[in-house]
Amino acid sequence: MARLMLRIKVSMILIGLFCTLYLGLLPLSEWFERKDLVAAPEEIVFVNTSVCHVSGPRNPAAFCCAIEPINKLRCRMPQLLTAVTQDGSNFLEANKISEDLNCRYWLKSRYTRIHSGRYTTDGRFDLKSGANRKIKIGTGEQIVRIRCSDKFNETKYHDVHYFLPPPDRKLKPTESPEKLSVMVLGIDSVSHMHFVRYFPLVQSFLENHPHTMFLGYSRVGLDANANLVPFLGGKSRRVAVSDFLSDEKFSLWEGFKMQGYSTAYGEDNAKGILSGRNGDEELPKNKVDFDLTPVLVEMDNHTRYSIDLKERIHCTAGRKFQEVLRHFILQLVPYMQGMLFFSFFWQSQGVEEYYEYASHLDLSYMMLLKKLVDADILNNTLLFLMSDHGLRAGEYRMSLQGMKEESQPLMVAIYPEWLKRKYPLAVGNLEGNAHSLITPYDLRETLADVLVLGQLKNANIEVGMKRLQSQPAHKLPRGISLFLPVPDHRTCELAHIPPLFCFCRELTEIPTDDGLVLRSSRFLVESINQLIKPFGQCRQLKLEMVLLAYFLDLGDESFVYELRLRVRTTPGSGVFEATVRLSDVLLLTSPISRVNHYLGQSHCVGDPGLKLFCLCV
């Protein structure tokens, strides 16, 4: 009997232990099951409208063929001097000089004609080995070039510095509750997926700040200039309440200046996107208060040296040009704290040429954004972190994924928290456009609304929404403010996106030896020859091979047929892409894009547009 009772007790204990373990582990097993159910999708959706759906792999296969030894691309000259402004005076500060040096400097104002060799004054000073010394240069805004030589007259240091003294706090304007500063922070040739791959720190920063990532942002032109000029200066019809920028020659620079904003512009290239071939052709005269161009031109003319074989990444002394640009932005922070600003900054060196170069920018851009937060700049600023297109040339661009990413540039809007509280309908529309098909023309209309921020109140936005909804499809404006809902039926044609840059259409690969494909490909090459024919120094090209051919589906109701072609030409092995429409006559329906590097083949022409096609005799 005692044994029986013992067995019963043991059985009850075991049953209780089993139930405890089972019931305790059940929530854990359910947690694992739920985790599987909500696993991240394998694809990311870029555009999701009734007429366009564009998606792609969330984690595209690793690409190793374009890896460059970018970790070795460092400036090889020493940085012996730094520029500091103290108590209203400008100084060159020397630290730990290793040998006796004799230095000469030249001063000029940024208002001096950019390519002029004139200097307002010059002077000399000595640096002794091991000495820490400050050399007073002058006062106010100045550009100074310094060359230091040793006793054998060998140059040991050659650099250009820019002095921008902090603003006078007494001149701080009265803050307006109905104004918002604007900053464009651009990185060339970065697609959305390239940003996902190589900017984890910036992505973590964004998670903690109000922002909208526009995955349906598309380019409308081949290069940076063709995509940014429509943004900063292109004409577009308005659908919102006001119409500040209806004049075709009315650029955003002028619009913001008229509204009392200070303006700033800087690139990391003396011959940049907006500066033009002569340094100041594209920017409106007298519309930029703080311009880095004269500093970069002085560096480009005197102190520049390259650190890569392609000669696309430049240094001055111990600093890359891109570091000079970021320092310029930080120099402007005290000004941005006290006044309204419209500022445009753009980096292109390195990222245009090297697939993995973007990975070395993540930390610096995260730190820059953090400093803007710490200085309270972003609490009163709409910031566009953006690009112009993806990688345009190289091995990765030759892949199907690279071809798609070229037309899916990065576009993120970062804004203060109070903006959504104050204008809920407008910002709600902004966030709702995350997967809409949008272009640089829309960005321009959005900033036109920022100029009259008070009109983003719900009642005004409702009027604009009704007006937009009443527009028939064929009369939709080219640019639509992102504070309004971009119509669901907007197509690439309605958004003025050329066929070569539109991935709303399905691509069907067809044989490259098809008769129509060969005829269209020869027409494409002949179109290139017509472009370069007036230039005798450029060789005429012949079709060597059709590399790829796609049929573009324009829908069942269309009687038009288009082909997307990739061809290789001889001599020179240039690889080009374009779309050709098949009708009674062949017609190019897109710009012609070159998708492999031409390096020094086009040295005999200066026009960037011709360099794509010209093989010098």
Image (cartoon, rainbow, N blue to C red):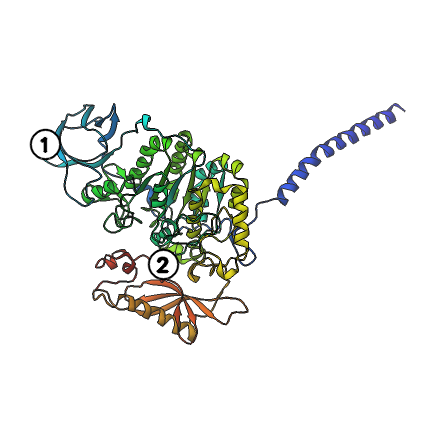
Q: Which residue sits at x=85%, y=28%? A: 8
Out of 551 and 77, give the one closest to the viewer. Answer: 551
Above or below, comparing residue 433 to residue 601 in the picture:
above
Farthest residue, direction left: 152
Residue 26: % across, % down = 71, 36
Could you say which quadrant of the image residue 532 lies in?
Answer: bottom left
Among the 4 quarters of the image, the one containing residue 172: top left
Tell me the mark number nearer the camera, choosing from 2 and 1.
2
Q: Position of residue 222 (x, y in %)?
A: 36, 57
Q: Which is nearer the N-term, disc 2 or disc 1? A: 1
Viewport quadrant of the N terminus? top right
Cα distance between the residues tagged 2 and 1: 50 Å
Q: Is residue 461 left or right of residue 500?
A: right
Q: Quadrant of residue 400?
A: bottom left
Q: Position of residue 470 (x, y in %)?
A: 55, 56
Question: What residue does disc 2 label?
Answer: 595
Q: Farthest right residue?
A: 1
**In the picture shown, does residue 68 fall above or below 127?**
below
In this orientation, which residue lies closer to the viewer: 23 or 272?
272
Rate crowding at label 2 as few (under 14), some (14 to 19) or many (20 or more) other CA atoms within 10 Å: many
Instruction: Tell me what residue is drawn at x 29 percent, y 29 percent.
Output: 166
Q: Amino acid at mark 1?
A: Lys
For the residues labelled 2 and 1, say whether their Cβ atoms are less than 8 Å apart. no
Amino acid type at image mark 2: Val
Residue 43 seen from this side: no
Q: Which residue is mark 1?
A: 151
Q: Position of residue 509 (x, y in %)?
A: 48, 66
Of residues 498 and 147, the one drawn nearer to the viewer in this rendering: 498
In the figure, is residue 92 to the left or right of 483?
A: left
- Residue in the image at 21% along x and 64% along y: 537
